[in-house]
Amino acid sequence: MPYINIRIGTTLDNAQQNKLYQKTTSLIKTIMGKRPEVTVVHIQESAPHLWSTNASALTDEDPVGAYVDIKVTEGTNTPEEKAEMLSQTVKMLQDVVGIVQEACYVVVDDIPANSWGYNGKTQAVRAASKL
């Protein structure tokens, strides 16, 4: 049950938003083995001037600022899967929105199974009920 928050320093059109939804969901399924039906992708757009690199606000002419936070249950993915997800997420952003800042960060947060949940049940409870 991954939650992916894509923060982007530009305004996207509907086609770009849909591509990010589809490609992100596909990557999390193929690379990290997560089920699409419980995958949430959240896009947050903001103006370039609300981002800065080296203490300088970005402009419309600068590469796009981006930050992606991927939350998954701790222990469900290997370091290699996470590394591939990081790499492919940046590539996806470049393909969909164009050139992104070199300081484009992708974070995989491993959340303990008893610290988050889905539909009112922790991941630990959901995993135990499948046994």
Image: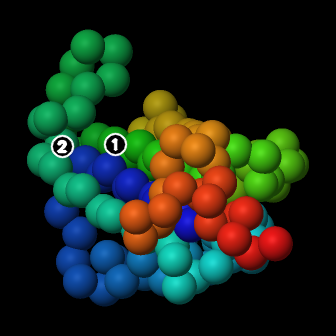
At 31% from the left and 85% from the top, the residue drawn is: 15
121 on left or right of 30:
left
The C terminus: image quadrant: bottom right
- Measuring from the top left, give residue 67's x and y in whole percent: 41, 43
- Please tell me how many numbered marks the rendered image carries: 2
> Pointer 2 and pointer 1: residues touching (CB < 8 Å)?
yes
Q: How crowded is mark 2: few (under 14 residues within 10 Å), some or many (20 or more)?
A: many
Provide the secondary structure element on which disc 1 rests: loop
Q: Which mark is residue 77?
A: none
Q: How crowded is mark 1: few (under 14 residues within 10 Å), some or many (20 or more)?
A: many
Provide the secondary structure element on which disc 2 rests: helix
Q: Nearer the viewer, residue 5 or 92?
A: 5
62 on left or right of 68:
left
- Mark 1, residue position: 65
State whether residue 6 is above or below residue 62: below
- Measuring from the top left, give residue 39's x and y in whole percent: 51, 73
Q: Residue 48 carries which label?
A: 2
At 26% from the left and 26% from the top, the residue drawn is: 52
Q: Which amino acid does label 2 sit on?
A: Pro
The N terminus: image quadrant: bottom right
Residue 56 makes an appearance in the image? yes
87 on left or right of 72:
right
Q: How far apart are marks 2 and 1 (CA)?
A: 7 Å
Of the two numbered discs 2 and 1 on the same chain, state the one appearing first in sequence. Answer: 2
State whether residue 112 is above or below residue 89: above
Image quarter of residue 106: top right
Q: Which amino acid does label 1 sit on?
A: Gly
108 on left or right of 30:
left
Image quarter of residue 129: bottom right
At 39% from the left and 55% from the top, the residue drawn is: 5
